[in-house]
Structure formats: structure tokens, C-alpha cells
């Protein structure tokens, strides 16, 4: 399949999507082909806005849609739209996964790449206090080993 363009859609509750877009621009310097849906800020029901945006893309565009909450109303709307239009839908957006896919060449993106990016993002989510404690304990154990 010959893909024309990569389109990134960030669909969240309130204005979170605009914040992600701004941060993405900060790191990449480019916001070409990045679109936001700030659900429930302009309309009571953003479904028509989402549908219109997806319909505006060419059929051979690669479309990646990020949402904020897996069980949230925005994601549920998007899941229903997968029947009418093929796109990659990722929920639980974070800046790391957004950056990784935004910087990927369009020809590198497929289902396996999406899975890899989600796995990478999951590895980057942890309770820092516990991680520091683990490192301190490891260093203490190593120090004790060398002291003997």
C-alpha cells in the first residue's frame, strides 16, 4: 500500500489534546498533520467533529489517533468509528509515545510498531520513589559485597 501522509489526531476530554500538541511542537518544531479534538469544550457531543475530521483525510493516509482514557466517552466514540475507517487507535496517551510515533517515518508504522511504542511507554511509567529505593538498596548490596 502506498501511503500519502501520516495524520496524528489527539482526542481528549477538555483541552488536554491542545496541551499535548503544544508539547509535541516544542520537541519536534513541527505540527504539520497534527489535529486535536478537545471534547466537550466546543460541543456537547464531539462525535460529529471527530467524524468530520476523519472523513477529511484521504483514504490512503496513515491515521494514528490517541485518546486519553480507555473507558472514557471519547475513546468509546472512536472505537465505534473503527468500523467505518481504518486507523490506529491508542488510548492512555503520554508524551513519550506521541513523540516516538510523530518522529517515525510513515513507512515504519504498522501494527507491530504501534505495539512496540505502547510497550515502550508502559516501561516508562513507574512510581519513582520505589525505583529510587530499589537503586539505593542495590547500591548498598553492591557496596557490602565489595566491603567483605
Image (spheres, grey):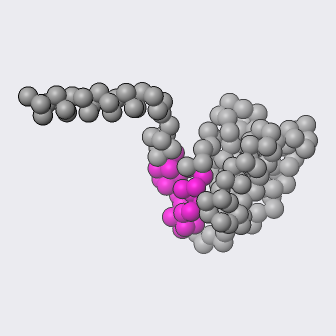
Q: Which residue is drawn at 62% across and 39% down?
A: 92
The residue most toward the left is: 148
Q: Is residue 91 left or right of residue 75?
A: left
Q: Where is residue 62 in the image (x, y as percent from the top left)?
A: 64, 62
Q: Position of residue 9 (x, y in %)?
A: 71, 53
The relative height of residue 40 versus residue 51 in the rendered view (above or below) is: above
The magenta span reads 97-118
Q: Residue at x 65, y 66 (%)?
A: 29
Camera sees residue 111: no
The relative height of residue 143 versus residue 56 in the rendered view (above or below) is: above
Q: Position of residue 60 (x, y in %)?
A: 68, 67
The residue most toward the front is: 147
Q: Is residue 123 left or right of residue 80?
A: left
Q: Nearer the viewer, residue 93 or 135?
A: 135
Q: Which quadrant of the figure has residue 21?
A: bottom right
Q: Which quadrant of the figure has residue 47?
A: top right
Q: In this view, does 33 lie to the left or right of 126?
A: right
Q: Which residue is drawn at 56% across and 63% down?
A: 103
Main secondary structure found in the magenta portion: helix
Q: Where is residue 118 in the image (x, y as percent from the top left)?
A: 51, 45
Q: Which residue is drawn at 90% across and 44% down?
A: 42
Camera sees residue 52: yes
Residue 109: say if magenta.
yes
Amino acid at each position: 500500500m502506498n501511503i500519502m501522509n501520516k495524520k496524528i489526531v489527539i482526542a481528549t476530554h477538555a483541552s488536554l489534546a491542545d496541551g499535548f500538541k503544544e508539547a509535541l511542537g516544542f520537541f519536534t518544531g513541527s505540527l504539520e498533520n497534527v489535529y486535536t479534538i478537545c471534547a466537550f469544550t466546543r460541543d456537547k457531543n464531539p462525535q460529529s467533529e471527530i467524524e468530520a475530521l476523519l472523513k477529511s483525510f484521504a483514504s490512503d493516509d496513515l491515521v494514528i489517533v490517541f485518546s486519553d482514557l480507555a473507558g472514557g466517552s471519547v475513546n468509546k466514540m472512536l472505537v465505534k468509528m473503527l468500523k467505518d475507517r481504518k486507523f490506529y487507535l491508542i488510548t492512555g496517551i503520554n508524551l513519550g509515545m506521541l513523540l516516538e510515533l510523530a518522529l517515525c517515518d510513515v513507512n515504519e508504522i504498522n501494527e507491530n510498531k504501534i505495539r512496540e511504542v505502547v510497550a515502550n511507554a508502559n516501561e516508562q511509567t513507574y512510581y519513582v520513589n520505589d525505583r529510587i529505593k530499589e537503586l539505593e538498596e542495590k547500591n548498598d548490596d553492591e557496596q557490602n559485597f565489595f566491603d567483605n
